[in-house]
Amino acid sequence: MKTFKGKVAVVTGAANGIGRGIAERCVEEAMKVVLADIDQAALVAAERELRAAGGAVLAVKADVTQIEDVRALAQTALDTFGKVHLLCNNAGLSTYKRSWQMTLADWEWVIGVNLWGVIYGINVFLPVMLEQGEDAHIVNTSSEAGIIGGRRNMAGYYATKSAVIALSESLYHELSETTPRIHVSVLIPGLVRSNAWDPNRYRPARLQDENNVTQDYEEFKRKSRRLFESDQAMDTGQAVDVLFKGIREDKLYIRTHPGTKDDIVRARIDDLLGGDNPVDRIPAYRDKVMK
């Protein structure tokens, strides 16, 4: 998709972080925007501020782990704006526990948002795009976690983000064979400034775990906040610049930080090809960049 003016975008996880940045750029591009998020207060604030900036926007509270919510989101978008040209399956979260200490509620939560949220988005919105017969684009948000290999205490996050990349690759091949007018990208962000360091505040009541807030989690949250608010974190606007350039160029893989962890990615591939046991190289990398 080369032009955006007058077209309709639906963005999940739109109230904060990268999602909010995408929504702001859509408004700048004179698009009509449907903002979806589970954070009602932040969602209302985003809608108000984007309308004040002249945007044609609509906020819809939606839980992407619930197919009924995603269907209702699509119907609201169509009832309000008539079509959908850009879908950003952006909602995501992380957990921090040993794999065997994660409850089924933990697994349901992280897989529900990070993977089922993408699956539901594709299942509901792609048929709409095919029926329209116009240029359209789907963006699935993954993470560098999807390309550097698994890490301790974050199995749910790394597993789902890897799956989003594989799903997007499959969709890329399928769309290439069937329709030249619809494209897919997988956004692979590195460290981008946001409040993603405290995902538990969005955890639904039905998936609460009384043992979820542990000392390890509090330490993880403290370190994560330091990273997300540090000078090492990319400004959201910069990340969105990279994204929209990639959309215009019909790129599948869109990395916000190309080159920053290439040595880690190559070393992981070498481990795979050589049959070597993996090494967690991230702590050394972070110690280096945070000096």
Image (tube, grey):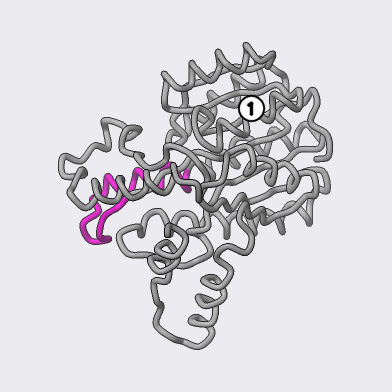
Which stretch did the figure color magenta?
A: 96-116
Q: Residue at x 59, y 46 (%)?
A: 140
Judge left or right: residue 92 versus residue 234. Answer: left
Residue 32 drawn in magenta: no
| Residue 125: % across, % down | 63, 35
Residue 115 drawn in magenta: yes
| Residue 155: % across, % down | 36, 59
Quadrant containing the N terminus in the rendered view: top right
Local crowd at mark 1 within 10 Å, few (<14), some, or many (≥20)? many
Q: Residue at x 50, y 75 (%)?
A: 268
Judging depth in this view, the residue of 45 and 67 nearest the camera is 45
Tag 1 residue: 24
The image shows residue 56, relative to residue 196, as above or below, that is above
Q: Residue at x 74, y 53 (%)?
A: 251
User: What type is the residue that disc 1 sits on?
Assistant: Glu
Total numbered labels: 1
